[in-house]
Amino acid sequence: MESYMKKDGSTKTLFDYSPQNQNYIIVNDLLEWEQKNNDVPLLNEKTAIKVYNMISRKFGSWKYCNLNRFSYSQKRNFIKAKPLKRVRKCWIGKDYYNNYERLIHDISHNLQRYRTGDDNHSSSQSILEKEITFWIIENDWFKDKVIQKPKIKLVKIKPTKIEINETKISKLDKTIENQEKKIKSIMESMWKNKTTRNRLKNLVVKQKQEK
Ligand SMILES: [Zn+2]
């Protein structure tokens, strides 16, 4: 890293204007600007995982990069309950609060490892982080997927004893009505058969007489 040394020997480290650092500055600048000017949805554990997996699918592989593939000890880095002392906070813990910075940075590391086998900070890792940031902003923070709609609960009203019995009665009414219909139809058919039989009997008697 470049530094400037004064005559008295004190040195000042100069800002590193490498392409890698420029990308990080762009990412930070964009995220800050978006959070000031756009209604960025808050992450919680559930939505952070959802967003993580969507980014994985887009920039890596659904099969190899989704969060379910992480063992608990690998995941533990993201689940810390207290914020890290560094600037970027963890994003699955209870202190999540607009932590897209951390989420995007972490996932860019993991996807970089998937793509190249090496997850160190590098210019290609910073480019990936920038691309992911562009994509998230382009998709308006996946608002429709991240913001949870309130669930409508159907309230079940418990019927009274009278109502239960009334329901039973009306069911029985229907059953009886059906049974009566069946009986009526059997009776009709039986009468028809009897009539036919009697007619035939009479016919046979007549035929015997004529013989
Ligand atoms: Zn890093």
Image (spheres, rainbow, N blue to C red):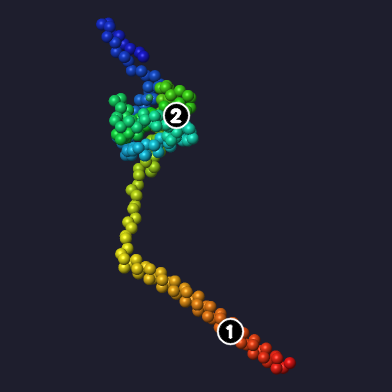
- Residue 211 position, x and y percent, is 73, 92
What is the quadrant of residue 67 in the picture? top left
Question: Tag 1 or tag 2, which sits nearer the N-term?
Answer: 2
Looking at the rendered structure, the secondary structure element under dot 1 is: helix
Query: Type of residue at label 2?
Result: Leu
Which residue is under mark 2? Answer: 111
> Is 167 left, or right, of 60 in this rendering?
left
Q: Residue at x 33, y 38 (%)?
A: 44
| Residue 80, horizontal then vertical, whole percent | 32, 31
Q: Residues within 10 Å of mark 2 (few under 14, many from 20)?
A: many
Q: Residue 194 carries which label?
A: 1
Above or below residue 136? Residue 168 is: below
Q: In which quadrant is the N terminus drawn?
A: top left
Q: What residue do we see at 30% from left, 35% from top?
A: 94
Whole-percent x, y for residue 95 in the image? 29, 34
Local packing at callout 1 (Cα closer than 10 Å; few below 14, some 14-19, many 20+) is few
Which residue appears at 35% of the width and 69% of the height? 166
Image quadrant where residue 119 sits? top left
Identify the element where label 2 is drawn. Answer: helix
